[in-house]
Image (spheres, rainbow, N blue to C red):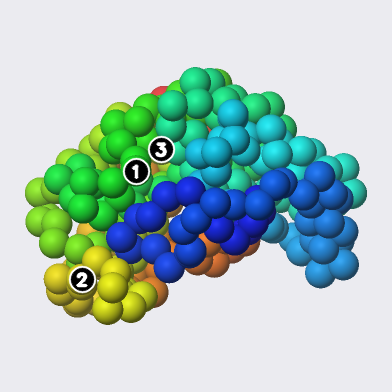
Amino acid sequence: MIMGDTCTRGCAFCDVKTGKPNKLDPLEPLKISKAVKELNLNHVVITSVDRDDLEDGGASHFKDVVLETKKNNPNTTIEVLTPDFLRKGNAFEKVLEASPDVFNHNIETVPSLYLSVRPGSRYFASIKLLESSKKIKPNVFTKSGLMVGLGENKNEILQVMDDLRTANVDFLTIGQYLQPSPKHYPLQRYYKPHEFVDLKNIALSKGFLLVASSPLTRSSYHADEDFKKLKKARDEQSKCLTLQ
């Protein structure tokens, strides 16, 4: 996680602290790059807190981290899990200029729950961000994550799937929400394992290249293995289109 440990927003599901963040560390791109090299990582996920205090939401910093990491780790694939860069214009394009292998932005929950669960964000702004990212960099995989158990109903989940597919999102993760503490948004119910299987099958039928759906699935769940699966799925899809 880059750009500090303090978020400018206070989402009701998240346990990251909220407040006034410190200034960006100009050496962070180099530090991240060195850490990836020392750990000999094949695949790395770079995420951050929300930085609404910055003019571009931290997009330039994201770009610098990705580029520096690529420079020193040419064989490492890179996934970014970004904020929504709300009200920052086309700032997100700076992240895409670094050509990450995966562009991930989590939708988190259904539209009806945004005001109570994710009040600082806007559902359709997140959908638009994912859609625009795919248009700008068609070869970069797009990915999004959804939590269940916050009070949504099945039809709302299916609508989110449709909205994400309309935005040409490639990869969907679905996991069980777990309440971090009594002060956070209350858990409404636990989904059963077979329900996650059902949701996965429905999502695949809607055209996602890959779906990870289980109680313990999270945004970066098996990211390295899933990236390989994504590439294989796209290759198979390309072959099918060629044969048609």
CA distance for labels 3 and 1: 23 Å
Answer few, some or many: residues within 10 Å of disc 1's Cα (few below 14, many 20 plus, some between 14 and 19). few
Image coordinates for residue 44, horizontal then vertical, percent: 68, 57
Q: Residue under label 2, please give it.
A: 186
Q: Residue under label 3, please give it.
A: 169
Q: Residue at x 43, y 32 (%)?
A: 86
The vertical placement of 167 against 114, above or below, is: above
Answer few, some or many: residues within 10 Å of disc 2's Cα (few below 14, many 20 plus, some between 14 and 19). some
Mark 2 in CB contact with mark 1 (< 8 angstroms): no
Earlier in the chain: of badge 3 and badge 2, it is: 3
Mark 3 in CB contact with mark 1 (< 8 angstroms): no
Name the one closer to the observer, 74 or 179.
179
Q: Looking at the image, can residue 178 be seen?
A: yes
Q: For numbered disc 1, what is the local secondary structure? A: loop
Look at discs 3 and 2 and give the one toward the viewer: 2
Earlier in the chain: of badge 2 and badge 1, it is: 1
Instruction: Report the quarter where the C terminus lies.
Output: top left
Image coordinates for residue 175, horizontal then vertical, percent: 33, 65
Name the one closer to the observer, 104 or 62.
62
Instruction: Report the quarter where the N terminus lies.
Output: bottom right
CA distance for labels 3 and 2: 29 Å
- Residue type indicated by callout 1: Gly
Label at residue 120: 1
Q: For numbered disc 2, what is the local secondary structure? A: loop
Name the one closer to the observer, 84 or 17.
17
Q: For numbered disc 3, what is the local secondary structure? A: loop
Q: Residue at x 76, y 38 (%)?
A: 64
Q: Looking at the image, can residue 49 be seen?
A: no
